[in-house]
Amino acid sequence: MVETNVNHGPSASPRIIAIANQKGGVGKTTTAINLATAMAATEKRVLIIDLDPQGNASTGLGIDRHARDVSSYHVLIGEASLAEGVVATSIPNLSMVPSSVDLSGAEIELVDEPRREHRLADALANQGDYDFILIDCPPSLNLLTLNALVAAQAVMVPLQCEFFALEGVSHLVKTIERVKQAFNPGLELHGIVLTMFDKRNNLSDMVAADVRGYFGDKVYKTVIPRNVRISEAPSHGKPVLLYDMRCAGSEAYIHLASEVLKREREWVA
C-alpha cells in the first residue's frame, strides 16, 4: 500500500518536483503519469505540467488534442494563467496542464524576454490548490527544462539500465548544481529511479550496482521493471495503474510512490 500521511494542507505551498533526463526513452513521462496516479490514489491533490512539446504525458492521460486550447505554452509566454491551463483528468485528485506543439517554439520566443528562466516559477507562485506538482520535462537541457529546474524544489531522474547511463546522469547532476548556483539555491536531487530493469540481463544488474555505488541513498530502492503492460498503457490513454493494476509495472510505481512520500516526510521533519 502507498503511504498516505503526508499532509500539506489546503493553504500550504505544493511540493514541486521536476522529472528530468536529457536522454529520451528512459521512462520519464511514464514515471511522471504513474507516480502522479499513485499519489492521487492516496488522496493527494496532484498536478502534472507537461513541458514536453511531444505531449506524451497529455496523451498518456487521455487528454484529447482538441482539449488543449490553453497549454503550458500559453502559460510560459504569459498569455494564460496556470489556472486557465489546468484540465481535469479521469483520475480523481489528478489534474494537468497539457502540452501542445506550439511549445517547441517557446524557446525562440522567450530568448529576449526578461526573466525567461523564471516564467514557470512565476506562474506557479501562490499555488495552494495542490499537494504535489510534477513537471514532465523534455528530453534535452534547453530553456524549457531550465524553467522546470528553476521552478522546482527537487528533481527526480529516471535512469534506464543501459550502458553509458551513469555518464549521462552525471552530466545532468552537474547541470542541477549550476542551476542551484545561478537561479535556485534550494534545488535538491530528490532521487534517481532505475527504469526498464531486466532481471534476465546481467547489464541491468551491473548498471544498478554502478549507479548505487556512485549515488548511494539517492537511488530509490524501488526499481521499475521492463514490462509490456507499461508500454501498452499509453496507447489506451491510461496510466498502467488503471490499465492493469496487478502487473509488475503497476506494483513498482505504487512502491515508488511510497518511497517518494516517505522521503517527503523526512524532508519536512
Image: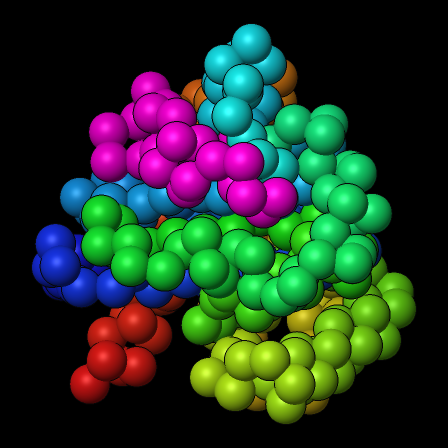
Residue shown at the point (64%, 51%) measured from the top left:
137
Question: What count of labels does the image hold?
Answer: 0
**In which image quadrant can residue 57 be found?**
top right
Q: Specify whether residue 114 is in view.
A: yes
Q: Residue furthest top?
A: 66
| Quarter of the picture holding the C terminus | bottom left
Where is 117 relative to 51, above or below? below
Q: Specify whether residue 227 is in view.
A: no
Q: Position of residue 148 (x, y in %)?
A: 58, 60
Q: Nearer the viewer, residue 110 or 182?
A: 110
**In which image quadrant can residue 226 be found?**
top right
Q: Magenta residues, as a range? A: 75-98
Asked whether residue 173 is drawn in magenta, I would say no
Q: Nearer the viewer, residue 215 or 170?
A: 170
Q: Position of residue 250 (x, y in %)?
A: 43, 39
Residue shown at the point (62%, 60%) measured from the top left:
147
Report the colour scheme: rainbow
Residue shown at the point (46%, 60%) measured from the top left:
122
Residue shown at the point (65%, 85%) measured from the top left:
182
Q: Residue furthest right?
A: 164
Q: Position of residue 119 (x, y in %)?
A: 56, 57
Asked whether residue 81 is drawn in magenta, I would say yes
Q: Left of 93 or right of it: where is 35?
A: right
Q: Position of residue 116 (x, y in %)?
A: 66, 61
Q: Left of 197 or right of it: where is 84?
A: left
Q: Left of 63 or right of it: where is 42?
A: left
Where is 205 relative to 107, above or below? below
Where is 151 relative to 190, above or below? above
Where is 259 relative to 197, above or below? below
